[in-house]
Amino acid sequence: MHTDLPLRNSSAPADVLADVASVGVALIDGVPGRSGLVALAHSIGTVVPHRDSDLDGATAIEDRAHRDAAMVGFTRAPLAPHTDRSSIENPPGLLLTVCSQEPVSGGESVIVDGQAVYDDLAQTMPSALAALCAPRSALFGGADGYLGSVFAPGPDGVVAVRLRLDSLVRFAPAVAPHIPALRAAIERHLVTLPVRTGAGYVLNNRRWLHGRRGFAGPRLMYRVTADPRPHTVTAGFRPETTVTGETAVPTVLRRQEPIDTTTTAEPAPLSSITAPGDHP
């Protein structure tokens, strides 16, 4: 399976920013835990506090045996690919994570390029993509959440993705029948990243989805959300196709040339990664 991932694993701010600007994600390594992740976030953007974060903006993601559906990230359960803070009007543009303690088994991160999912649906299920782009077609986060769409095309040609697939999302009747096609497209583009102390990723939260596999034993990850500095990272992606009605047509807007690599990891069926949450 081919995916547009950067070849390097670097925590140098210039490298991280270049990779996120180019393909929407940077793989990082050698990060000294919480303090290193916070420092990296400050070097490439402005830290955005999370509901669950501490004063430094970092959140420790570990098993706390929570039973609330909204807090499933603080368990050992798997997490379906999602974007962070989907229930607010302006989610943070960047998500940074690093592993501080590897579990006994499992716990790999899974990431999905929203642009790949969009372009996939444009070719295979344009009617599904049109429904997923419809304004005010999904309520994220319950009654006091955000009413929007999975894919939100902007006037500048940039498309932003927003997604959760848990009990805290409601889809319009015209959209709900297309969710299986969305899940299938996500599964086709799943990339598995091994969990390793000091390693993690930085991603464009308006383009890439993230989740994890279930695990056994202690697992400690740190997460920081941030907004990139102005004019450094696109708030989404420029698709290779646009949707008009129920048809997809080529667009003159082309994505930036990616750095191509290959991953041989076989993703588990998406149905086995059903737990939601804003946690890596």
Image (cartoon, grey):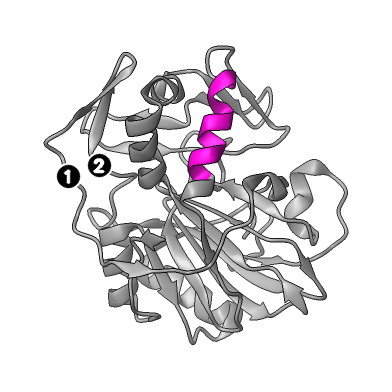
Residue depicted at x 23% and y 39%: 240
The one of 40 and 125 positioned closer to us in this rendering: 125
Pinpoint residue 57: horizontal percent, then vertical percent. Answer: 58, 64
Q: Which residues, given as a range, are shown in magenta? A: 176-186
Secondary structure type for disc 1: loop
| Residue 97 to residue 273: above or below | below
Spatial CA distance of label 1 from label 2 is 6 Å
Amino acid type shown at disc 2 = Arg
Residue 49, compared with residue 56, is above or below; it is above
| Rendered image quadrant of residue 9 | bottom left
**What residue is shown at x 69% (from left), y 37% (from top)?**
166
User: Which sits earlier in the primary sequence, circle 1 or circle 2?
Assistant: 2
Residue density around tag 2, few if under 14, some if 14–19, many if 20 or more, within 10 Å: many
Query: Residue sitting at 15 percent across and 39 percent down?
Result: 253
- 164 or 120: nearer the eye? 120
Residue at numbered disc 2: 238
Dot 2 lies on which element? loop
Asked if the residue at tag 2 contacts the one at tag 1, i.e. Cβ–Cβ closer than 8 Å, the answer is: yes
Quickly name the residue at label 1. 254
